[in-house]
Amino acid sequence: MLAKRIVPCLDVKAGKVVKGVQFRNHEIVGDIVPLAQRYAEEGADELVFYDITASAHDRVVDKSWVSRVAERIDIPFCVAGGIKTIEQAREILAFGADKISVNSPALSDPSLIRRLHDEFGRQCVVVGIDSFFDADSGSYKVKQFTGDEAATRDTQWYTLDWVEEAQKQGCGEIVLNVMNSDGVRQGYDLVQLSKVRAVCDVPLVASGGAGAMEHFRDVFVEAQVDAALAASVFHKGIIPIPDLKQYLREQQICIRADDRHQRIA
Amino acid sequence: MTKTTAATVIIDTGCANLSSVRFAFERLGADVLVTDDADAIKAATRVVLPGVGSAPAAMNSLKQKNLMALVQGLTQPVMGVCLGMQLMTSKSTEQGAIAADTPCLGLIPTEVRALDTQGLPTPHMGWNQLTPVLKNGQVHPLLEGINAGDFVYFVHSFCAPVSEYSIATSEYGEVFSAAIADGNFMGLQFHPEKSAAVGAKMLANFLKLDSDSLAAYNARVIGGAA
C-alpha cells in the first residue's frame, strides 16, 4: 500500500535553515546537511528545501549545497526557490535533487511548468502554491514572491483555478501552503485542502499549520492528501518524527516502516 | 580499491539526474564510474542503466550516443533503474513528439504501458510495498534479504504489467512489476538509491553480482523447473 509521506521542510536562506512565523522574522535553526541527515535518519519520507530568498531578490543563489545533500541522504528531496529556466532546473537535478518546485516564476509565466515537464518529465515538476483566505471576497487566492514580505503581492489567481491550470501545464505534484496557517501550529486548513483535493489529480502535499500529531492524522484522513509538510514542529523538537509515525500507525494510517530507525531504537 | 568495487559502471545516458545513483553506490564504499565510453562499459563487471524523464527522449539519447547495440550485447549483470528498467523492455506506449509507441532495447521480453491507477493520484509517487516473486523457490539475488512489505520509493506513470519476468510486484490501482529480470538483465521500477536502508541493501546485493554468480542463480532456477 502506498504510504502517506511525512515531509520536513527546510527553508533555506544564505545557506542556513531558517524558519519565520507567517513568513516573517526568520531565525536560523541550523546547517543544511546535518539537519537533512538527521531527518532522514529519524524516518522522514522526503525533504523539501525552499530557498526563500531567491525569487524575491530576482536572483538564483549558489545551489552547490544540493550536491552535498544528495551525497549524504538516501531519501528523495525537492528543491524550490527562484527556478525560472530549464537550465537552472537542469543544474539542480544534476546535483542530485529528485524534484524541482516552482512557485512565483510559474505564476509569472505558466508555460514554465510545461517546458519543465517536456524536458524532465512530469515526475520531477512540483508546483508550490502560497494560498491565503481572502476574508473580503470569502475565497482562496494565490500570493506571489512570499519569500520577502516587502515583495509579496497578490495575484489574479483564485487558488482552485491555479491548481487546475498547473495540472494542465503538466505538473506532477502540488504543494499547497496555506499562508494563514503557516508557522502558527493551529492545524492544517482541512476545508481548503479538501476543496483542492477535489480538483487535484496529481499527488497533493499539505503545508502550513501543523502543531500536533492529530493535525497530521486529520489532514491525511479528512483532506486525503498524499503527504504532509511541516517545519517548526520538527525543527523545534515539538514532534519527534518516530513518535509521529508510530502515532499515525496506531490511527490505521499507512506509514513507511523504517528499518534503520527500528535498529537504532 | 578492490576489483569488485572498481568494476561498476553507470552508463551516462545523458539524462539530468545521474548523481543520485552514483552517490548511493559511493555511500556503500563502491568505486563507480559514470561514462558513455563503450570500452569502459564493455569491460565492467556490472553495469547500471539509469534514467529519468520520458522513454522517447531516453531512447533518442541512447541512439545519439551509439549505445543501443552496445547495451544489447552486454553479457555481464546489467541493472536498469526506473526509466532504465522500462528501456529494457521491447517497447513502451509512452509517446514523444511522434504519436507512436517507443521501441525499446528488447532485453527483457515484456512491454511498458500506462499504469492503471483506478482514479488514484497520478503519477504513482511515494513509498510503496514490495512483494518479491520466487522462481522455483529462489529469490532473485538482487532481492536477497528483502521482505514482503518492505517499502521503496516509486515515481512513475508507466509500468510493466505482471509477467513471467516479474521478480517483485507492487500495487497502486493495479498490481504491476516492481522489478523484472531475464538472464543477465534486471530492472527496478522504483529508485533503490532513494529507498533508504531497503534500497541500499539491493544496491549492496548488486555490487556482489558478477556473471558467474548470476549464471549460477539462473541455472538453479532452470534446474528447478526441469
Image (cartoon, grey):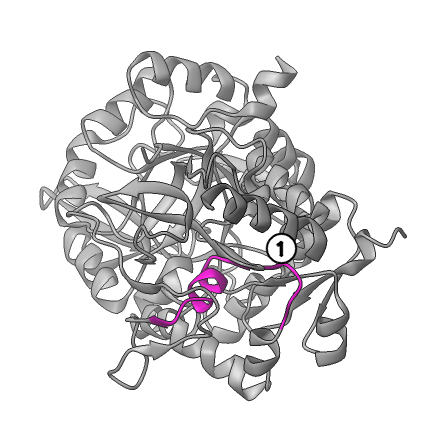
Q: Determine whether A190 is above or below A141 in the image.
A: above
Instruction: Between residue A163 and residue A183, name the one nearer to us.
Output: A163
Q: How many marks?
A: 1
User: Where A219 falls versus A16 (above or below)?
Assistant: above
Circle 1: is it few (<14), some (14-19), or many (20+) Cα within 10 Å?
A: many
Is residue B206 visible in the rendered image? The answer is yes
Query: Tag 1, which secondary structure?
Result: helix
Q: Is residue A107 above or below residue B132?
A: below
Residue lying furthest left: A137
Q: Residue furthest front?
A: B226
* Residue at left offset 49%, top offset 21%: A241
Q: Which chain is home to disc 1? A: B
Residue B210 appears left or right of A93: right
Q: Is residue B49 above or below residue B58?
A: above
Q: Position of residue B210 (x, y in %)?
A: 71, 54
| Quarter occupied by residue A136 | top left
In the rendered image, residue A66, in percent from the top left (x then y), is placed at 63, 53
Residue B85 within the magenta-colored segment of the rendering: yes
Q: Amino acid at mark 1?
A: Val
- Residue named by callout 1: B21
| Location of residue B77 (image quadrant) | bottom right
Residue at figure coordinates x 23%, y 45% from the top left: B174
Magenta span of residues: B74-91
Query: Relative to the observer, which residue lies in front, B160 or A196?
Result: B160
